[in-house]
Image (cartoon, grey):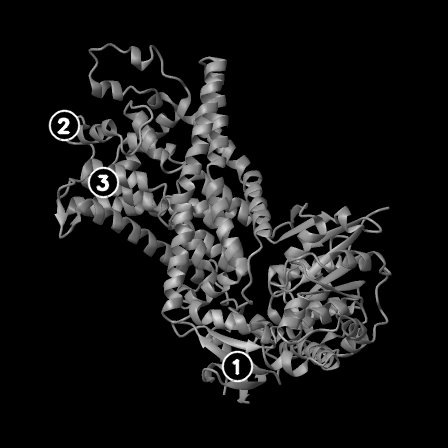
Amino acid sequence: MTALRVALAGNPNVGKTSLFNELTGARHKVGNYAGVTVETREGAVHERLRPARPLTIVDLPGTYSLTPISEDEAVAFRCLAGEGQPPPDVVALVLDAANLARNLYLAAQLIELGRPLVVALNMIDVAAAAGMPVDAAALSRVLGVPVVPTVARTGAGAAELVAAICSLDPVPQVSSPLRARLLAAGPSALAGLGADPARARWLLSAAAAGTLELTGATAAERAALVRLDAAAVRQGAHDLIVARYREVDALLDALGLAASARERAPAMDRSARIDRVLTHRALGLLIFAAVMATIFTSIFTWAEPLMGLIEDGIGWLSGQVKDGLGPGVFTDLVTDGVIAGVGNVLVFVPQIALLFLLLGLLEDSGYMARAAFLIDRLMARVGLHGRAFVPLLSGYACAIPAILGTRTISSPRDRLVTILMIPFMSCSARLPIYVLFISALFPSDESVGPFTVGSLILLAMYALSTASALAAGAIYKRTLLRGPTPPFVLELPPYRLPRVRNTLLHVFDRTAEFVRGAGTVILAMTVVLWALLSFPRPPGPAPEAAPAAMSEQAAADDSPIQHSIGGMIGKAMEPALAPMGQDYRMGIAILGSFAAREVMVSTLGLVYGIEGSDEDDQPLREALRTARNADGSPRHTPLRGLAVMVFFVYACQCMSTIAVVRRETRSWRWPLLMFTTMTALAYVMAVLVFQVGRALGYA
Amino acid sequence: MTLADLELGARARVTAVGGAGALALRLLEMGFVPGTAIALIKRAPFGDPLEFQVRGCHVSLRRAEAAQIEAVPA
């Protein structure tokens, strides 16, 4: 027997995810629609629930309506209507029993659609506790579809829901009186939009919202819409919504819920009391700061030991392979190319998992909506939504989890702007570069007031990066990604204890998706970069066998990396590097830093013939301090060091960022635009620093 | 008056939702339909956005968005 496909629909925050996990035993696969980042999950109903026939549950994105205003709604409608895919056999709608006055609106739209429908009346316990118990049998009578009371948190009602789905007559319900009443409310603008009443309504609303591109309307449908008067389209779309709510009110009256459910919010009483603290004018902001500090610390500090473990593991594996295979080009390919590439992917896993764990728990509890509420005023100045704050903040730790975290921003345009801003934030991988140049080139005993010069320069780098990110956002919002400010309209859901299992499943999905989706690109780029910096090998004897008489300087200038293709590219770049006060050595280091910015330090070490150096490395600092040009002048001066630091404030020298942006935007267009504009900006700013500095008399 | 003019804790009844495009549709769909009673629950610490009670939920709107919704005191 083929499995019945059951689409699970519902508003956000109604316990849909819990119910899905309960139905499927949390075994599912994540699906993505082409071109969009909206996730759907799919899984078979667990045998424990004894389905009379096999059922496949498709979890649709949580939406307030099927009107195509955002991508989520478009995906939900297209799945339900069976556009470009077979339609589901049954639709299961999850309703929040404590919030029927708004939830029933989606029910009205689904009934217009006319597919076989079952309602899971969830959180009946919450509704009863709030003093407005709902009679499931009465709701079933007025809706004309089976209604099963459920408590998804405990799993109560899941088996009954499965039984109701299995025994449902899988023919579209064309004769429902409610559906007839809903479809009778037909504004004149609907005429000429085709025979399918649900589709005609969907097209009309999309035309009124200006989002026809989300609908996949045919040329004929577009032509029909163009002929309509704009005011008539707008009025028609408004009338449809008002008519649906009129039916919702009639349903509430029939259930005896009218006054309590529509005029008051008893289920929000407890949350309103909590909000007296959490969104309090002073206290609320303090708590917000503390929560944000915790999120930041988690990816900046707490993830570090785990990342260290992964790096150690990769190092150990490399060592084993080296011992096993013996020295040679193939060994180097496996260890420095493939194993290092796998390491470059896995090293992000702790940060991603920690960020999504915290965000998931906070989102589930209802706090993230409050966080957006608190900070929206400040974000609105840049033209962004309050929800953009957390991803931007995370960017100070690492762009990879931060970019993945932008999925909470519902407007695709705003999400893209935020993604393009994040790489400007000074991530933790830039810190080693700042530290190396500050400690090597700026005297540690010189201070301005109570601050050392070094700490002020470090602060200036962070200030520069923040200001640049905000400016980039403002510019993108006014040029390439100009568009109407998307509606803020944010529900502040009731506070609930987060479900750890749901969150952990989500963390696993997202992390696995990163490894699969962006991992291959990162791995491939690591191998290519390794080859660039390793071939061709230096001629003649290895440097360690060089005559002892050879000066240190000369030995450094003969380090193997200088003979590689990367070394040649660096040398070829020298004329371009001179205006920013650098020579080819820095060119090689910049090239190497494409693997990850902090690799710039160890690459620079290799250029100076120092193996495995880091920013605390005394020989490397000493080498930078003492290096002289042919004319005897110092090669690295404070001004030249500053130019390099400014270059790295702007440069998008991080292949993983590029891989993740490609993954998240589903195209190479945005990552390439980001890389070229940021590199150009980095170059211009570094040249500016060096030239202005020189004009002011610095070397 | 519009919902942006509502006093803290006061209630009003929606008479019309103005403005074109996606915002007006979204406001209507979130329950700001004519005839519905709305209460202003809170203003965010920086004065914007606003938190409204509408149809059993709490929904936050920016001041500019609330100004699209015509209402009469209730």
Q: Chain of mark 2?
A: A
Amino acid type of the residue that numbered disc 1 sits on in the rendered structure: Ala
| Callouts 3 and 2 in the same chain | yes
Please provide percent x and percent y for residue A20: 68, 54
Q: Is residue A189 left or right of residue A168?
A: left
How far separated are the C-alphas under marks 3 and 2?
Answer: 22 Å
Residue on which the image places disc 2: A632
Disc 3 marks a residue whose amino acid type is Ile
| Residue A205 % position (x, y) | 66, 70
| Residue A412 appearing in the image | no
Quarter of the figure with residue A301: top left
Residue at the image position 52 percent from the left and 55 percent from the top: A361
The residue where tag 1 is placed is: B39
Above-or-below relation of A615 to B38: above
Query: Amino acid under label 2?
Result: Gly
- On screen, residue A526 versus residue A509, left or right, reads left
Circle 3 is placed at which residue position?
A438
Q: How many marks?
A: 3
- A658 in relation to A226, above or below: above
